[in-house]
Image: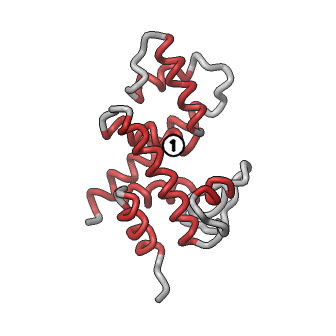
């Protein structure tokens, strides 16, 4: 039996313990549900997954919609769980996981360190965003900030209209 995109997102959302509507919001932001999309950084498919990330989750075909969603969802879930394990509240953990999904874990870790050095709370997304302007080498700061806002806005819409 062939699974449709919503079924795939629900399946992997359940497996990864992430609300499938949040995964859907990420997919919309990443690719507008266009499987053929490839970014300038060579991220591919619905969730704009790098082949190296996909391989980490046992996926060898990032153009297979189900495998793309599997890899992207497991990656996002890992980011989210990592922030929750640090003791961040769920709202901030989701924001940091989204920021990391967009800009990379290392970049967001660097941003958190800069926030800390400025006397800001490294565990509060809005404080870390305030630190972005102190980072001349972070050219994607406005894109990452807008990414988090857009995904959360769409997720909120999905929560309101979809059970």
Q: Residue at x 34, y 33 (%)?
A: 88
Q: Residue furthest bottom?
A: 1
The quadrant where residue 57 appears: bottom right
Relative placement, left or right, of 103 versus 14 is: right
- Taking depth in this image into account, of 60 and 30 the one nearest to the observer is 60
Q: Is residue 153 above or below residue 162?
A: above
Q: Residue at x 41, y 75 (%)?
A: 7
Image quadrant occupied by the C terminus: bottom left
Q: Is residue 92 above or below residue 42?
A: above
| Residue 27 coordinates in the image, percent (x, y) | 51, 59
Q: Is residue 74 above or below residue 136?
A: below
- Taking depth in this image into account, of 69 and 136 the one nearest to the observer is 69
Q: Residue at x 48, y 54 (%)?
A: 26
- Name the element at disc 1: helix
For the image shown, how many numbered marks are present on the structure? 1
| Residue 48 coordinates in the image, percent (x, y) | 61, 56
Neighbourhood count class around disc 1 (C-alpha, 10 Å): few under 14, some 14–19, many 20 upward: many
Q: Residue at x 61, y 73 (%)?
A: 64
| Residue 143 coordinates in the image, percent (x, y) | 58, 38
List the residue tagged with mark 1: 147
Q: Is residue 77 above or below residue 31?
A: above
The quadrant where residue 160 appears: bottom left
Colour scheme: secondary structure
């Amino acid at each position: 039996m062939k699974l449709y995109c919503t079924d795939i997102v629900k399946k992997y959302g359940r497996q990864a313990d992430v609300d499938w509507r949040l995964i859907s919001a990420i997919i919309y932001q990443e690719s507008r549900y266009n499987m053929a999309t490839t970014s300038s950084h060579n991220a591919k498919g619905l969730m704009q997954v790098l082949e190296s990330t996909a391989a980490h989750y046992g996926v060898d075909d990032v153009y297979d919609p189900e495998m793309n969603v599997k890899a992207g969802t497991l990656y996002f879930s890992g980011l989210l769980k990592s922030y929750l394990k640090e003791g961040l509240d769920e709202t901030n953990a989701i924001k940091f996981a989204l920021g990391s999904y967009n800009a990379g874990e290392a970049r967001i870790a660097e941003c958190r360190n800069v926030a800390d050095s400025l006397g800001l709370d490294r565990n509060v997304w809005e404080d870390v965003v305030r630190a972005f302007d102190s980072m001349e080498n972070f050219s994607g700061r406005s894109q990452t900030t807008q990414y988090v806002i857009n995904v959360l806005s769409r997720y909120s819409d999905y929560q309101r209209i979809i059970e």
